[in-house]
Image (cartoon, helix red, strand yellow):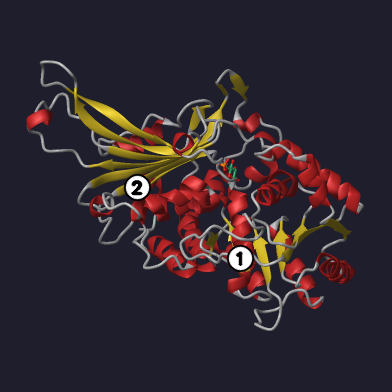
Amino acid sequence: MVQGTLPSDSGRPSVVESCSLVIFGASGDLARRKLMPAIYNLLLDGMLPPHFAVVGTSRKDLRHEDFRAGMREGVEKYSRRPLDRSAWSAFESRLFYHRGSISEAATYDGLRSLLTQVDADQHLPGHRLFYLAVPPDAFAPICHGLQRAGLAYPPDANKPFCRIIVEKPIGHDLESARQINSALAQVFDESQIFRIDHYLGKETVQNMMVLRFANSIFEPIWNSKYIDHVQITVSEAEGVGTRAAYYDKIGALRDMVQNHILQLLCLVAMEPPHSLDPDVVRDARMNVLRCLRPIAGKEVERMAVRAQYRRGSCRGIDIPDYRHEAGVTPDSTMETYVALKLFVENWRWAGVPFYLRTGKAMPTRASEVAVQFKDIPQILFNANPTMPQAPNVLALRLQPAEGFSLRVISKVPGTKAQTQPVEMNFNYGDAFSAGTPEAYERLLLDVMIGDASLFMRRDAVEASWAWITQILDGWKTEERRQLPGYPAGTWGPIEADQLIGANGRAWRTI
Ligand code: BG6
């Protein structure tokens, strides 16, 4: 494939314009683990624009060569495809480094000079992407530094484009999210801001829209008339690991539900968008957030369960009590598990409960969206009330072993009228030979193209925080009860089983 030319693809632009990517926080983990491996794989796939450069910046005193060596090591360790020496050596001369503190004007002046030089040497037209791989309190100083140096400006048809990419956490509640968004908005127009939620970049997450809207069999039954309930599970087998300093201030609700899981919910529950235009798709997702019934005040105790893992083991590996993990406060009340029951109050979903659960130190790493259909009438093959027939379930597996399965009831071969549930299984890996790209590959490419469909718009970030903050407030005012525990390596506390069990339902076995 010609470099910079994309396969034709539902109306997306077919050419990626030459540009440079500036990474703030370039000596950190994200650049090594995710960004550079993603760029490298785009390179191998011929997806990078014809002319492209990366400029890393951080406070560390590095030479261009040191930066290149660090990035190479990142690719060797974390790329989904092994390092091809000749491809890398041809590419690495396009990586540059600039040392500087984000609070000093000289950093941005120096960056501007380097970028001007790089543009001239690499035949770049001056289009720039600024990736802020830094904590959110650094966003405002960086935006202003870039603006002062003339590197950031509003969209202007006569000037090269400049875009900014930011990572979560975008705040820890509604107020702080608004502040971060306002700081970005002082310098950049919303159309220039790309807020990453890496779940939206996952191939199987994108497939949820295709499954729903490119097949005729699902949409007619995708509503409260046929669907009994929906379960979304994102379980992780590891404990908090080395991230305790961050996690102990955040917890599972903020870390996973506010962003990733609510976005999964939006994709399951959204109305069909009338086009694939980024804002039309984002409006459709946003409308689901608008319809969420608030969980506030007394409802919090009824609809939200939180818990913390205790000592246990997962697949033979011992996991300590959360409160004994290095970096966790010994009397921490931070949740490592959360389960919610919620309702999307619109015509399609009236009365259908959605159950969400996520946690660390659970039996396995799995993400799944399961749509359970209503029971059939208690006649014919379902006439025995003591042995009700299993319902149909469409389960979308997001990771691992991406694919989906449909549970249907079949006759057991033989002379009896005996029935049994069977699974119709589809595995991505079996059906498509090409390796699945990492989320960051797709997301970085989309920023280069300027396609914001898979990014979080300001209104969506704030709407999900508004909804989540009510639960957080409820937890704050809840009488100080004992926080439930669950042994590491199990599926969560009994309270979560009671949450879903109250209406005769049960969590799926994954
Ligand atoms: C991150 C969370 O956003 O997502 C982590 O901060 C979590 O705590 C991770 O482990 C899960 O992502 P993935 O892609 O491994 O499912």
Report, in whole angstroms, how far the alpha carbon at label 2 lies from the one at label 1. 40 Å
Which is nearer the N-term, disc 2 or disc 1?
1
Q: Position of residue 481 (x, y in %)?
A: 48, 39
Q: Evaluate whether residue 352 shows in this view.
A: yes
What residue do we see at 58% from left, 49% from top? 439
In the drawing, does residue 160 fall left or right of residue 260?
right
Q: Which residue is mark 1?
A: 15
Q: Which residue is mark 2?
A: 354
Give amino acid for label 1. Val
Looking at this rendering, what residue extends furthest in the top direction? 415
Q: Nearer the viewer, residue 226 or 293?
A: 226
Looking at this rendering, what residue extends furthest in the front direction? 1
Q: Position of residue 181 (x, y in %)?
A: 61, 68
Q: Position of residue 235 (x, y in %)?
A: 50, 36
**Quadrant in which the C terminus appears:** top left
Q: Is residue 47 shown above or below 227?
A: below
Instruction: Give SS at disc 2.
Output: strand
Q: Is mark 1 within 8 Å of ligand 1?
A: no
Give amino acid for label 2. Phe
Q: Position of residue 243 (x, y in %)?
A: 68, 40
Q: Is mark 2 within 8 Å of ligand 1?
A: no
Q: Nearer the viewer, residue 214 or 23?
A: 214
What residue do we see at 71% from left, 76% from top? 160
Label 1 Cα crowd, 10 Å radius (few <14 / some 14-19 / many 20+): some
Location of residue 445 by image quarter: bottom right
Q: Evaluate whether residue 476 shows in this view.
A: no
Q: Nearer the viewer, residue 194 or 43?
A: 43
Give ligand 1's quarter of the image: top right
What residue do we see at 20% from left, 51% from top? 225
